Amino acid sequence: MPTFAIQGGLMEKKKVSISQKRQITIPQKFFTLLGFDKEAECIMRGNELVIRPVKENVSGEFATEILEDLIKKGYNGQELLNEFKIMQAKVRPAVELMLSEAEQVANGDGEYFTYDDVFNSEDDE
C-alpha cells in the first residue's frame, strides 16, 4: 500500500473494487487499525466519501457526569431517567459539531482560540 506524508500524519492509499451491487471490501489492515465491527458510517464530504467505523454509545462516556449533574439538580426516579435520556442524546451531536469545527480550523477555514484566549482572564492584563 502506498504511504503518503500529509499534514498531521501519514496517509495510506489502497484501490478497491466496487461490485455490481455497489459493495466494497475494506482492506484488512484498515479494518483492524480503525476498529470496524459490524457497521460503517458513510459521510459525503464535498466530493469525497468518508467511511468510518460506527462508534456506539459515544454519550455513554459522559453518563456518570450527566447523572451527577442531574442528581445535584434534584432529579430522581422516572424524572431523572427522562432527563438523563434527553441529556445523553445531546452528547453525540455536540461532539460531532466540535469535531467539525476543529476540522475547519485545521483546514484554515474556521475561527480558533489560543490557550491564552481561553485561560487568561482580563485581570491578568
Image (cartoon, grey):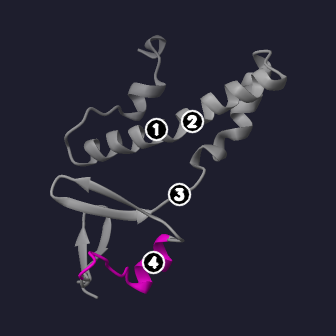
Contact between marks 2 and 1 (CB within 8 A): the answer is yes
Q: Secondary structure at mark 2?
A: helix
Who comes first in sequence, dot 3 or dot 4? Answer: 4
Give amino acid for label 2.
Answer: Ala
Q: Which residue is mark 3?
A: 55
* Comparing labels 4 and 2, the label whose residue is closer to the camera: 2
Contact between marks 3 and 4 (CB within 8 A): the answer is no
Q: Position of residue 2 (x, y in %)?
A: 24, 86
Q: Which residue is mark 1?
A: 93
Q: Quick one: quadrant of the N terminus? A: bottom left
Residues under labels 2 and 1: Cα distance? 8 Å
Between 48 and 113, the one lying in front of the other is 48
Give amino acid for label 3.
Answer: Lys
Who comes first in sequence, dot 4 or dot 2? Answer: 4
Q: Which residue is mark 2?
A: 89
Q: Residues within 10 Å of mark 3 (few under 14, many from 20)?
A: few
Who comes first in sequence, dot 1 or dot 4? Answer: 4
Quarter of the image for residue 71 reads top right
Question: Which residue appears at 44% of the width and 27% of the height?
Answer: 118
Q: Which residue is mark 4?
A: 31
Question: Which residue appears at 61% of the width and 28% of the height?
Answer: 86
Residues under labels 3 and 4: Cα distance? 14 Å
Q: Residues within 10 Å of mark 1 (few under 14, many from 20)?
A: few
Q: Which mark is residue 18?
A: none
Residues under labels 3 and 1: Cα distance? 13 Å
Magenta stretch? 20-34
**66 to the left or right of 92:** right
Q: Residues within 10 Å of mark 2 (few under 14, many from 20)?
A: some
Residues under labels 4 and 2: Cα distance? 28 Å
